Amino acid sequence: MKKTSTLTFALLLTAGAGFAQNNDASLTQYGNNHEAQIEQIGSANQAAAEVLGGNNSLLDIFQQGDGNTATMEELRDNIQAFQTQTGNDNTASISQARQNNTITQKQDGDNNTAGFTGHNIPSVRGGTYLQDQVGDGNTAVIEGANNKNVVTQTQVGDDNVATVRGSNFSDNTVTMEQTGNSNTAELYLPGSNWNYTRIIQTGDDNIANAEQSGSSSDVWITQSGDANQSDALHSGDGFIDQDQAGDENTAFARATSSAEITQEQTGDNNTALAGKTRGGLNQNSSATQTQTGDANYAEIEIRQGNGRNNSFTQTQTGDENRAYVLDAGNGNTTTQIQEGDGNLSKIGEMGNPQLGGMDVLTSQLGDDNQAFVFGNGNDRAEILQTGDMNFGSITQLAGDDHAAISQTGNGNDATIMQNN
């Protein structure tokens, strides 16, 4: 059964407001037992809806204001779709959805855009999608969804951007919440399944980017403050969590397989990196970086192919501390703790995959201390420094070596080299 109607409304507004004009509405329905309602209050609004088959669909479009546009196209089979726009010059669109999808778009303000486009195959079904915008100039986009996804995008403020893009992704759960102005949250799901993503942004000018190209991974990004940036790219299962509280912090993580990365930054201008290359952290690796203070820098690099079963922890409390881990071995355990200002700790490992790599601990309490550890093989190294302007260095090149440096006081210098 086909029902087609084209309607032009001139609706009476409140007393003294005169008549609204030039609203257009069109409705096309194929199938049985569909329900549709279009209501427009204001001027120059446009609404169009079409159901191309199936049964029992429910469509509702409400627009109040001027210059709003709402469209629903290529919908089929028991769809529930709702578009509510209050304000001026808003745009809402829904296309390519079928079979038990529920899609809701709500906009309160001016110049907002909300768009949903499903993956263009017959099986797009069973999902729940919510796009809720309060403010002006906000953009929310969902593209490429397939089956049984749950996606929520909430924006309160102005000029925020939230996008979920991909191709044929299913069974994913995505939550994006933006409170403030000019925040950007972007997620890419290239055919990904059973992933969980949560991006929470509170403040202004924050940027969060995530890509999950595997299955059964979790990515959590939380930003509180202004001008923070967080990137997370995950191609395996496992968990990535990045929390930023403060301003102008940067967190970047790339991981493969079962990565468990946690990066927390409290303060301003901090930078934390884990797995810089495209391969990122390899199988069963874990990295934890915690920075409290300003202008701290922590970096972990585990090279793909030689970075299994690793655990890394870097904790910095104070300002302008720097900690590095550059690793190419297996089975390594590294812990670096720095409390104070201007401390530098660097571990460069070239572990033999057959021997299991290095076990390293560096701890520096004070200011302007430096600790360096370099090794190759199943080595153990420990540097403990308490005071200011201490220097400790351990180099182990043979394998199965053990070395320890402990210094208390100021201006101490210690070097250990083992080569055979």
Image: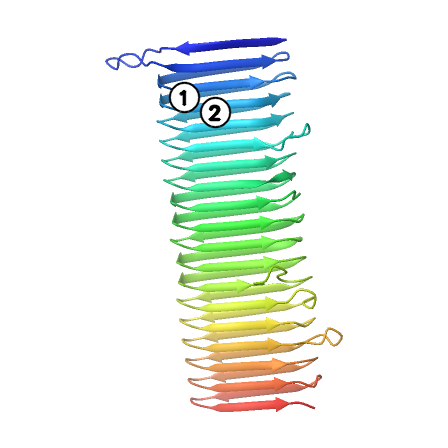
Q: In x, y percent, where is residue 372? A: 54, 81
Q: CA distance from mark 1 to mark 2?
A: 8 Å
Q: Residues within 10 Å of mark 1 (few under 14, many from 20)?
A: many
The circle on residue 63 is 1
Quadrant containing the N terminus is: top right
Q: In x, y percent, where is residue 102? A: 57, 27
Q: In x, y percent, where is residue 142? A: 54, 36
Relative horizontal placement of residue 384, taking residue 16 as reference (left or right): right
- Amino acid bearing label 2: Gln
Q: Determine contact: label 1, label 2, CB under 8 Å.
A: yes
Q: Is 151 located above or below residue 324 in the figure?
A: above
At mark 1, the secondary structure is strand
Q: In x, y percent, where is residue 16? A: 23, 13
Residue at (49, 59) in percent of width and height: 251
Q: Quadrant of residue 383?
A: bottom right
Relative horizontal placement of residue 297, taking residue 395 as reference (left or right): left
- Amino acid bearing label 1: Gln
Closer-to-camera residue (18/411): 18
Q: Is 47 located above or below residue 332 in the figure?
A: above
Which label's residue is closer to the chain start, 1 or 2? Answer: 1
Q: Residues within 10 Å of mark 2 (few under 14, many from 20)?
A: many
Closer-to-camera residue (114/389): 114
Q: Quadrant of residue 181?
A: top left
Q: Is 404 located above or below residue 152 in the figure?
A: below
The circle on residue 199 is none
Kindly identify which residue carries mark 2: 83
